[in-house]
Structure formats: C-alpha cells, structure tokens
Amino acid sequence: MDEPCSEGRDRPSASFEEVFSAEYRRVLGLASALCRRRFLAEEVAQDAFVAAFRHWERISTYDDPGAWVRRVTCNLATSSFRRRAREMRALLRLSSRRNPDDELGAGDDAFWDAVRSLPHRQRQCIALRYLEDRSVAEIASVLQIAEATVRVHLHVGRTSLAARLDEELEEEAP
C-alpha cells in the first residue's frame, strides 16, 4: 500500500495536483464519516493533504499516494476526537465550579495578572499546577509535552513570577 513504486514502473508518478483533484472528495467523505461535523472534516482532510504536500517527494513514489492521505486522515480524525474529548472533560470540570473568580482571593489578582504575562506554555503549566493542583505528570498529559519540559516551564515561570512579584522563590518538589 505505502510502498515505493518499483524501479521499472511504466507510468510516471502523478503530480500532487492530480492526486488532490482525484482524491479530495473521497478523503473529505472519509473525514466526514469519522468526524461527524463538516467543518472538522474539512479541516482534517485539508491537514492530511498539507502533510502530503510537505512530503510529496517521498509520497509521490508510493503506488497509491491516496492511501497514505487516507491513513493520515484517519490518524488526524482520531487525534481530533481525543483532543475534543480532553477539552470537554476540562470544560466539565470547570463548569462544576461555582465561579472560578470566586476561588481566587482578592490578593491573588496581582499574581494571576503576572501569570497572564508569562509565555503561553509557562502560563498553562503554572495555571494547571496552582489552580487545578495537577501533578507534573498530569500537566504533561494535558498539554501533551514531556514531564521534563513541564518541570522547566514551572521553574522558569516561578522564577519570572518571583522577580515580577518581588518575592523570594520557594521551589517546590514536583
């Protein structure tokens, strides 16, 4: 299926444009069946073709480049489903709280303003750690990054916060 063509193949490999024209509707149909929502299916199908375009030099040598695009479509649809499921679980957890602002004390405004000024990954790690009391492993899972990366973001974020808030840094164990 995804094997390079044999050396003595008679027909030249199709161009990306030819494969896109021939396969897009069927790939979109597959994505629609997997995603259930048209806009998500279009995004998944387009992303699969973008990946094919990026690697076209290699993929064009396959006997059936469309099969490769379909496999990528299936993988992207699965990833999209998993990401949406994680987002829904997070929204459900947040909705079960009365009001997230009620949980933050008045003295916390300066802290959370400083957190919001951090780079996005540091901000995400700090919020998950201190707002949701998540472990390094849980944060890594939520953000889909390595635990070591989470520890680095927490350390650098805490250091920046301490400097911004003019406080002594108290390192905590992960």
Image (tube, rainbow, N blue to C red):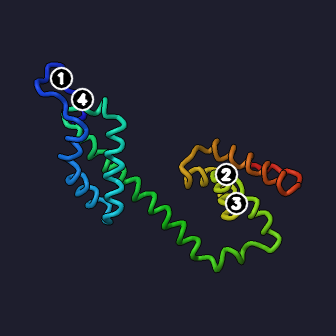
Of marks 3 and 1, which one's residue comes earlier in the chain?
1
**Left-right relation of 75 to 17:** right
1 versus 8 height, above or below: below
The kind of residue on which mark 1 rests is: Ser
Q: Name the residue under label 3.
A: 116
The kind of residue on which mark 4 rests is: Thr
Image point (56%, 52%), residue name? 143
Of marks 2 and 1, which one's residue comes earlier in the chain?
1
Q: Distance between the residues labelled 3 and 4?
A: 48 Å
The answer to whether the residues at label 3 and label 1 have Cβ atoms under 8 Å apart is no
Q: Where is residue 147 in the image (x, y as percent from the top left)?
A: 62, 45
Q: Name the residue under label 1.
A: 6
Element marked by disc 3? helix
Q: Where is residue 95 in the image (x, y as percent from the top left)?
A: 57, 75
Element marked by disc 2? loop
Report the quarter where the N terminus lies.
top left
Of marks 2 and 4, which one's residue comes earlier in the chain?
4
Q: Which mark is residue 61?
A: 4
**Left-right relation of 160 to 120:** right
Q: Residue furthest bottom?
A: 98
Q: Using a 10 Å C-alpha cutoff, classify the residue at mark 3 as few (fewer than 14 neighbours), some (14 to 19) or many (20 or more).
A: some
Q: Which residue lies furthest to the front in this view?
A: 17
Q: Where is residue 89 in the image (x, y as percent from the top left)?
A: 51, 66
The answer to whether the residues at label 4 and label 1 have Cβ atoms under 8 Å apart is no
Image point (66%, 54%), residue name? 125
The answer to whether the residues at label 2 and label 1 have Cβ atoms under 8 Å apart is no
**Left-right relation of 54 to 110:** left
Q: Distance between the residues labelled 2 and 4?
A: 42 Å
Element marked by disc 4? loop
